[in-house]
Structure formats: structure tokens, C-alpha cells
Amino acid sequence: MAILKHKSLAAQDHSLAESKNQIDVLTDVAVKPFSESLNENGLFPLKPTGVDIFQINLGKMCNQVCAHCHVDAGPDRKEIMTKETMIQCLDAIDKTNCSTVDLTGGAPEMNPNFRWFVEELAKKEKNIIVRCNLTIIVANKKYHDLPGFFNKHKIEVVSSLPCYTELNTDAQRGDGVFTDSIKALQMLNKVGYGGKNSDLTLNLVYNPGGASLPPEQASLEADYKKELKANFNIDFNSLFAITNLPISRFLEFLVASKRYEEYMNLLADSYNMDAAKNVMCRNTISVSWDGYLYDCDFNQILELKVAAKGQHLSEFNNEELENRNIIVNNHCYGCTAGAGSSCGGITT
């Protein structure tokens, strides 16, 4: 499978991958600070509603290099969660009342301990989500049985498919990605995923190809279901429409194309109080590959650790986390613009 040729931000000298530089850029534009918008609605400081979703980044290694990837994932990334840190995750989960464990990456399946970890999580009787990029399933024969493995453990599969056409998908995710994604979706359907009467959930994720907000989600989902069924006999459950956040690779695109200020104004002007009340960071804890704790995976990329005494799994304190103030900055407009980011902004 061909992948999009994109020089990794991690390998660029003085690049925007440095979190401090990204934050400087985020605040260096004439938009109302996000904290002020929250304050006008009585939402600042933003407080958690609990820890219902335990989100875990298993590493930044990925078989794809997507243009919009906020994690800056790719085949050259070496950051991988160890088994020791996974055990710390399992211990921390027991200290919460979370209902869902959300596994993301990179491609989480490329972590050598991925299957062991899923089997241990399954013993806890939590809803397990895997953010699968689809192409990993057909990338190598050792991954061909993933649909059956997901089925066995009743995994909820969430996968990015930026469009139901080859041209638009490959433009964002790399040459050949659409064809491989269709093959993977058909394999998932074959073992029962996405069926109307099935308990195996398959959800897709849409994000715009450029500096615009996503269209209305319900009508877009209807289009996806019609086109994928008619052309490829593919079924899925729901479509999540998310907004590209101005960090990492997408931030570089905005700066290089001189559209950063325009895009930030679009996000700020589209601020939705109802979306702000329900942002995913309010009921989520995000864990990085090295065991540090964040309010969301966007703050993770910006290295904005939780505002609590215990910032690492080794000192996990659920009470502290449930009473913390959530750290916000102008990138948060991405999760509150328009209808909001229904998938919490997590792309795969």
C-alpha cells in the first residue's frame, strides 16, 4: 500500500511539532481567547463531569502518514506504550467508574502487546473502542485476522473514512488508502460488523479535507450509507463528523497556505455554547504512550498535562482528576464550532 509522502514533523528542525511553538501560534491571532467565551456562558473554569471514558494512546507508530493527523503518526515513529505502562493503565481503570476504554494511536494494533492488553481489558467488562485506520487490517497478513479478534471481544470499531469516493480519501490519507479501506470494511461486515441487527458496532469518521467546518452530520451519514451500500455493499452503524483542529500537521498546512487566521476566525465565530457544555474532555482522561495524563488527546500533543497533583499513571488519583480544572486554549474552538466534534476530535 502506498502512503502519503509527508515529512514527519518530528524530524523537522524548529518545526511546529514543538508544543511551545504551537501554543505560541495558537495565541498569536486576533480572536477572543477561548476561556473568555467559556466565561461568558458560565463555563469557566471548565470542570469534569467524571471519568467515564479512559482513553489510551498505545503509540505513535502507524502504517499511514495522513495529512491531517494531529498525532504526527507514521512508520518512523518509535513511541510505543510498554507492557508495564499497560499494567498501570489496568490498575488506574479499577480506581474509576469508567464505562468505556478507548484505544487509539497511531495504529494501536501495531503495539506488540495490543492483543494481550485487549484480552485483559475484556475481563473488566468495559465497552472497548479501537480506533482502527482500516488499512492496517490488509497491510500485512499478521493483521488479517483482526476482524475476527474484534468480534471475539465485542470491540466497538471506529474508523476514519474522509469520503465515500477514492479521489477525496486518497488526497487526504495517501494513494491506495481508499481501496484498502473498502477491503477492510468488507472484511468487518463479513464477520458481522455494521449489520442492522448485529451487536457489533462499526462507526465511521468524517473530517473535512481543508479549512472548513464539516457539513450537517445526519445528511452526510445518509449519503455515506447510500453510496457505500450501492457501490460496495458495505454497512455501518453511525458516521461521526469532526472538525480539524489547528495543531500539528494541520496547523502547518494552515500556516503554509496563509489560512491560519481565517480558519481560527471561522472556528471562533462558530462557537456553540451547547457544544462547549458537552465536550469530550469533561468525561474523559487521556493517557499518553508514556503514561502521562491529559484532558484530551489534543492537549496531549501540546504537552498540556492535567492540572492535578498526579500527572502520571504511577500517581493516579481519581478524586484529584474529578475535581481538576480542565486546561483550555484556542485550539479548543475546534471542538465547539458549529455542531461540535461528535467524536471528541479523535481521528484515526
Image (cartoon, helix red, strand yellow):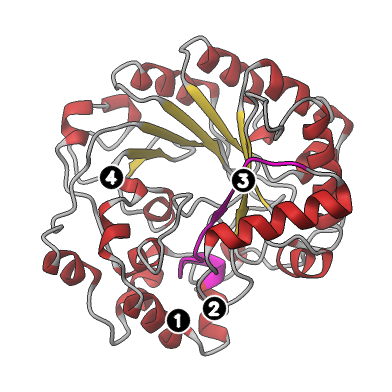
Over which residues does the magenta segment extend? 235-250
Dot 1 crowding, Cα within 10 Å, few <14, some 14–19, many 20+: some
Occupied quadrant, residue 140: top right
The x and y percentages for residue 263 are 45, 81
Q: Position of residue 51 (x, y in %)?
A: 29, 32
Residue bearing mark 2? 211
Q: Which residue is mark 4?
A: 282
Which label belongs to residue 263? 1
The residue tagged 3 is: 106
Numbered disc in front, either 4 or 3: 4
Residue 287 visible in the current orientation: yes
Q: In the figure, is residue 268 to the left or right of 187?
A: left
Q: Is residue 295 above or below residue 72?
A: above
Pointers 3 and 2 in contact (C-beta within 8 Å):
no
In this image, 306 relative to 324: left or right? right
Question: What residue is shown at x 41% (from left), y 63% (from top)?
Answer: 339
The disc, 2 or 1, on the residue closer to the chain's N-terminal end is 2
327 part of magenta stretch: no
Q: Nearer the viewer, residue 136 or 86?
A: 136
Q: Which residue is farthest top?
A: 123
